[in-house]
Amino acid sequence: MLFNPKVFSQRAFSQKARKKINVGIIGGAGYGGTELIRILIFHPNVNLKFVTSRKYAGLKVSSVNRFLEGLIDLKYIEPDISIFPEPIDLIFFATPHKTSMEMVPRLVREIPEVSIIDLSGDYRLKNPDEYETYYGSKHSSPELLENFVYGIPELNRDKIRRARYIANPGCFATGIIFALYPLLKEGLIKSPVTVVAVTGSSGSGDVPKEVTHHPMRAKNFKAYKILEHQHLPEIKQFIRERCGVDELEMGFIPQSGPFVRGIFTTAVAFNPGLSQEEVLEAVNRHYRGLKFVRVVNGSPEVVMVYGTNYVEVSYRYRDGFIVGMSAIDNLVRGASGQAIQNMNIMFGFEETAGIWFPGMKP
Ligand SMILES: NC(=O)c1ccc[n+]([C@@H]2O[C@H](COP(=O)([O-])OP(=O)(O)OC[C@H]3O[C@@H](n4cnc5c(N)ncnc54)[C@H](OP(=O)(O)O)[C@@H]3O)[C@@H](O)[C@H]2O)c1
């Protein structure tokens, strides 16, 4: 076991006392990494020390992203541990799967005091066989899986507070867990659940592929990875741990919609004998007072959470059918904003620091 809670709590205390931590980003030129930069440069407790990109190493971050002109002085560096400036307190991985599991063992060995938040799927699943099934390659550092805490802040805060290593949830998984959590926690769902969730094109990252190319996406709407998306096992694992549902029976149909940011989730189950009031009371017991979770009447809307860390949820019950819906911004709540919220909790900062801003209208 690499994690020593005593050492970590002393360290967390001293971090809190000096109020600023040194942070690096591996994979800082993609959509998730750029979103991390956009938020972290205004974070009151963060000194952003390095950002990596193999493609842009040596170039100024602001010349690659001109919307950051005048806001950041760093140049991209290679993702090479031996050149990372020290001391460093926290490293975010915003890289495709397989990258962090290759780099983390060396990081842990050579910078044992560093904290890690991984936005990829590499450390989300406790069972390395499931990783192989859903990600198509053997896990190369399974001995570290137990040290990572699943970082869905409002629903796993106590573990996150004590964690050194965080596996940030997948974007679909975040939307689906928020839509279903209070219903499953309160035992209101007894049937299999059908989930349909629609994502915008930024969910596929910044490397163009035929299926993500604008002419093929702009006016299109389609399903993909039907009943076999890689976020299924992390949802089931979390629900097993936090809601005591041993094997959630869930069919998940991911869809891609003609918009850039956002995920809209609809989950449907059947339980005769409930009422709309009972469902809403259960939801409110878990979500009332949470700053980033908005329980709305009618439908959640992606435009209301666009560019923000908010989650909108809504619930409807009629004729035995329970419908739970959610809307998130995949790059903020589904990735970087949620990662920064996890950082805030880990380091004892104000939980909303750096991510407390509203959406926009329209
Ligand atoms: N997009 C979303 O909505 C979203 C939401 C939640 C989670 N995620 C997850 O977050 C991660 C990043 O997603 P993204 O959409 O930001 O992807 P992306 O746009 O494709 O960016 C990936 C970044 O990783 C770097 N990279 C690629 N291979 C690397 C390697 N072998 N070593 C070091 N750096 C490497 C790339 O830069 P260079 O090639 O220049 O080094 C780039 O900066 C993925 O695991 C994704 O599944 C994404």
Image (tube, rainbow, N blue to C red):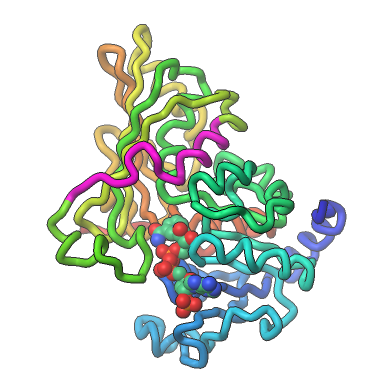
Q: Nearer the viewer, residue 7 or 254?
A: 254
Q: Which residues are magenta?
A: 221-239
Horizontal relation, residue 179 to residue 58: left or right: left
Q: Quadrant of the C terminus?
A: bottom left
Horizontal relation, residue 98 to residue 346: left or right: left
Is residue 268 visible in the rendered structure shown here? Answer: yes
Can you say whether 70 is above or below 41 in the image? Answer: below
* Displayed quadrant of residue 326: top left
Is residue 35 visible in the rendered structure shown here? Answer: no
State the residue at coordinates (36%, 58%).
203
Q: Nearer the viewer, residue 287 or 197?
A: 197
- Seen as rendered, the residue at the extreme left is 219
Can you say whether 300 is above or below 73 in the image? Answer: above
State the residue at coordinates (28%, 59%).
201
Q: In x, y percent, where is residue 301?
A: 27, 45
On whether residue 231 falls in the magenta region, the answer is: yes
On whether residue 229 falls in the magenta region, the answer is: yes
